[in-house]
Amino acid sequence: MSNHPIHLKPESWLVAAGRTIASGEPLNVPPIPASNFIIGQERSYARSDATPTWEALEEIVGGLEGGRALAFASGMAAVAAVFDQLPVGAHVVLPDDCYQGVVGLAMAGATRGRWSVQRLPLTDTAAWQQACAVADLIWLESPSNPLLTVADLPAICAAPRKAGAIIAVDNTFATPLNQQPLEFGATVAIQSATKFIGGHSDLLAGVLTTREEQLWQKLRQSRTLNGATPGTLEAFLAIRGARTLALRLERAQRNALELAQRLQSHPLVANVRYPGLPSHPTYQVARRVLKGFGTIISFDLKGDAVFADAVCRCVRLIRHATSLGAVETTMERRAAVAGQEHLPPSLLRLSVGIENVDDLWYDLDTAIRKAAPL
Ligand code: PLP
């Protein structure tokens, strides 16, 4: 592996990291489809000993997050490895707004009596600081999915915490370019690499990063025992995607700010949530904590779920699809998703891609006007 000096700026790191430096070897890390290795060196079986392809992905993401990384089969496999560290009877704190898969996993464990779950508003920094003193797992997601609330991570991560407690931050929406939770004192940073790191809607992968060597070893053991290892092709594609992450993010977040501003003055739009709009409740925190405001916008229409569903059917360039963080712009009515019924019925979540912003606006505005009830 390359082991480039860490002083490279993130954009250069994304391009340079995870490559071999041996002459005569391929410039790019190839997908190495191996489960089994000839015994005698450090690898004998992929599930326990990893492959060079996963390790290249780990080097890239770990360098950006500022710790040692582990690649997983999906974002949820990475999440599950963190929950796997909890002793029976542990206390878990989750945000009021949080990816529904994580909520589902936490509630399933609570139902089986493995741990207790408390929910807190992401904006109540003092409550989170108090929770740090008693919780075994503080789970934060910032910006949150789908309300895009930005937590005051530096203040929460600096609070005194229970011995052995884990502060885990789902950093998927921010990406490691816009936010580095480990710098603030978090124990683990989580990426669903399915989203921005892959960036092309063609893979599932997850990455955890930590600075605590013992915890890294335990997370790796969990990955090995649960068989939550990434696929070779997926790791290869995630590396391919990561090379252009900085460029994609820069363009998509410029598009997102422009679209958020235009949506704000749209006559058929009731409310726009984007961390970079001064009207967003956590705008001041976002300015202080994030290096960029991201590419996701949530907005409510002046109307009901029927109107919002019709808008999703009317878009042409924008795709009616779940998930986010890819080159193409996608849109979804979130209250239609199982476990998200509490959200405003006409809330549309837009993951802004790298297309021309005027084409995106034309498509969105046309769809809203076409779908509007007479
Ligand atoms: N975290 C967030 C914020 C997500 O949006 C998602 C998926 O949508 C996940 C985690 C889970 O990732 P995956 O689908 O790769 O398992």
Image (spheres, rainbow, N blue to C red):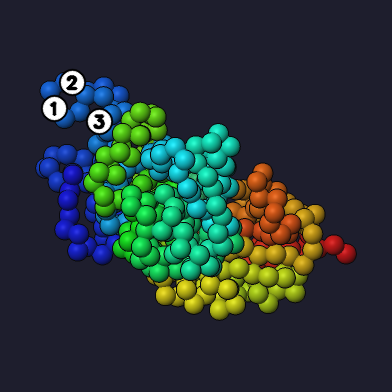
The correct choice, above or below, for 75 with respect to 161 in the image is above
Hey, which quadrant is residue 58 in on the image? top left
- Assign the C terminus to one quadrant of the image: bottom right
In the image, what residue occupies the spot 35% across and 28% down? 225
Q: Which residue is mark 3?
A: 49
Residue 227 in picture, x, y percent from top left: 38, 29
Distance, label 1 to label 3, CA atoms, is 11 Å
In-front residue for pair 283/354: 283
Q: Nearer the viewer, residue 302 or 162?
A: 162
Residue ID at (18%, 20%):
38
Helix, strand or loop under label 3: helix
Question: Where is residue 184, by image quadrant?
Answer: bottom left
Q: Which mark is residue 38?
A: 2
Residue at the (43%, 50%) spot, across then down? 137
Which residue sits at x=77%, y=67%?
Answer: 302
Report if residue 80 is visible in the image.
no
327 relative position to 281: left or right: left
The correct choice, above or below, for 273 with respect to 338 in the image is below
Residue 238 picture location, percent across and down: 38, 45
Q: Position of residue 263 (x, y in %)?
A: 65, 71
Q: Is residue 222 left or right of residue 17?
A: right
Residue receiving disc 1: 41
Proximity of marks 2 and 3: CB atoms separated by less than 8 Å = no
Q: Quadrant of residue 82?
A: top left
Quarter of the image that includes the N terminus: top left
Q: Residues within 10 Å of mark 2 (few under 14, many from 20)?
A: few
